[in-house]
Image (cartoon, helix red, strand yellow):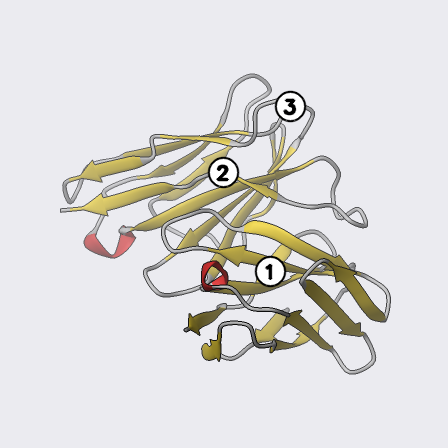
Amino acid sequence: NAGVMQNPRHLVRRRGQEARLRCSPMKGHSHVYWYRQLPEEGLKFMVYLQKENIIDESGMPKERFSAEFPKEGPSILRIQQVVRGDSAAYFCASSPVQGAANTEAFFGQGTRLTVV
Amino acid sequence: GQNIDQPTEMTATEGAIVQINCTYQTSGFNGLFWYQQHAGEAPTFLSYNVLDGLEEKGRFSSFLSRSKGYSYLLLKELQMKDSASYLCAVLGYQKVTFGTGTKLQVIP
């Protein structure tokens, strides 16, 4: 039973390019969270998705960032026209049930985005 | 909204005991997690508290007081490998919100 899989592990993009980060949740998990972590800082919530639904995107920047979790396939975090400030580690976590007691969110290994 | 506070850094000696505090204000509460994160790695689950009191798991224990909006993580018999960031996280109505983490350095 594979854990949360994120790819790529490392991504380098030039300013102005697009970055696509993928997250495959644990088998049987239908809830996905994306977090961003800047160097030496904590995890900041970005978006919470269920299959084909965005539940909470209060942590997503209003422009250039979007996320989806289609019926088939991984969840995608898309950053358009990247800037240097987007350089960070992006972590995905999945859980089986929304807000349930003792719902441990399992984390992927993260994608480290570097914008040059 | 949710606000979570924990100290930025702590230093402790190998073999000693350290307590990492976390206070929170939240509009909904369904439990509090502690995660450990080594530099460059993903967070890993340590504990979950939803009722008041102490939960013990080996060298690690976690305490919760819901009325005070307070939790602590207690690490006993510290080892060098315990040097890491410790993240306090609150499960609100729908999402898990993390504090900025406490960077623990264990020294010989």
Provide residue A21's location: percent of width, then percent of height.
38, 34
B102 vs B94, nearest the viewer: B102
Disc 1 element: strand
User: For residue B97, which numbered disc appears in the image?
Assistant: 1
Give the residue type that dot 1 points to.
Thr
Name the residue type under label 2.
Answer: Gly
Q: Residues under labels 2 and 1: Cα distance?
A: 17 Å
Q: Chain of mark 2?
A: A
Question: Could one spot residue A67 in this view of the protein?
Answer: yes
Rounded to the nearest whole Å, what is the CA distance between mark 2 and mark 3?
13 Å
Return the residue found at the far top.
A72
Residue A45 lies left or right of residue A66; in this view the side is right
Residue in front for this viewpoint, A12 or B28: A12
Find disc 2 in the rendering and name its residue: A108
Residue at left 29%, top 40%?
A80
Q: Is residue B76 above or below residue A35?
A: below
Please tell me if label 1 and label 3 are on a single chain: no
- Residue A112 image offset from top left, x and y in percent: 31, 43
> Which chain is disc 3 placed on?
A
Distance between the alpha carbons at the discs numbered 1 and 3: 23 Å
Q: Position of residue A14 (x, y in %)?
A: 14, 41
